[in-house]
Image: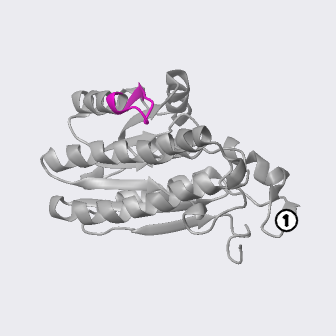
Amino acid sequence: MAMTGERAGNVALVTGASAGVGRACAIAFLKAGYRTVLTGRRGDKLEETVAMSGVDPAGALCVPCDVSEPAAVDDLFGALHDAFGRLDVVFNNAGTTVLGKPIGDLSFEEWRKLMSVNLDGAFLIARGAFNMMRAQDPQGGRIINNGSISAHVPRPGSAAYTASKHAMTGLTRSISLDGRPFNIACGQIDIGNAATDMTVRMQEGVAQPDGSVRAEPVMAAENVASSVLHMASLPLDANVQFMTVMATTMPYIGRG
């Protein structure tokens, strides 16, 4: 459904838009009438996302980018500014994981690779969005960070991923404070078991805290997209600070 009223034609940026939750959210923004900037590592997959939306591609801009590289992120925001002149909402979504293993078996190289995307990349995108929103007229905008159920409780063998998502919560809280003088709102969506390539193993069996391996329920990624779109649609004097959306019967309540 296309947007009407004052938010019609607003500009959204979605990172990690080439697959999974990012793809579902980019499609939702496009269908809602946002002029949407899609970024990810593979340009062909970004173009595929736009085609899947079924909307006029004139309202989309695909910019391949490695969010862990500061110069690449600067170029991304330069391209966004040249194309649309402002930014109203960013879904700070790009992330990665490593195969589950105890912290004693986790190499520093694996740790740094994950942190470079999940934390360094989130910081670089948030900083770029903040600076653009602070400088534009009218001033302000909204930053939505992708947290995780792991921002609250860990899975076995997930030290790096869990640490990155706990850090995301701190980043969200800090941006919320820093943004107040500039009409910049910041919230976080914590997602549990959305059906994507990253969560295929959930349906096949995943390690539980009691040492067992069990299949877990998943939900459609479109449920995340509709939730992100709701967060984005609020006026800037209202904010969803934290939202948890998950498969209803996944082992989160009671996990540990």
Residue lying at 38% horizontally and 38% vertically, measured from the top left: 36
Residue 156 within the segment the image draws in magenta: no
Residue lying at 22% horizontally and 40% vertically, measured from the top left: 86
The answer to whether 117 appears left or right of 192 in the picture is left
Residue 67 within the segment the image draws in magenta: yes
- Front residue of 187 and 68: 68
Q: Quadrant of residue 179?
A: bottom left
Residue at far bottom of view: 254
Residue 169: x and y in percent read 44, 63
Residue 231: x and y in percent read 41, 61
Q: How is the image coloured?
A: one colour
In the image, residue 208 above or below residue 137 = below
Q: Is residue 68 visible?
A: yes
Residue 194: x and y in percent read 65, 54
Residue picked out by circle 1: 211
Residue 180: x and y in percent read 21, 65
Q: Is residue 2 visible?
A: no
In the image, residue 11 above or below residue 48 = below
- Front residue of 175 and 233: 175
Please state the extent of the stretch shown in magenta in the rendering: 60-71
Residue lying at 15% horizontally and 52% vertically, measured from the top left: 139
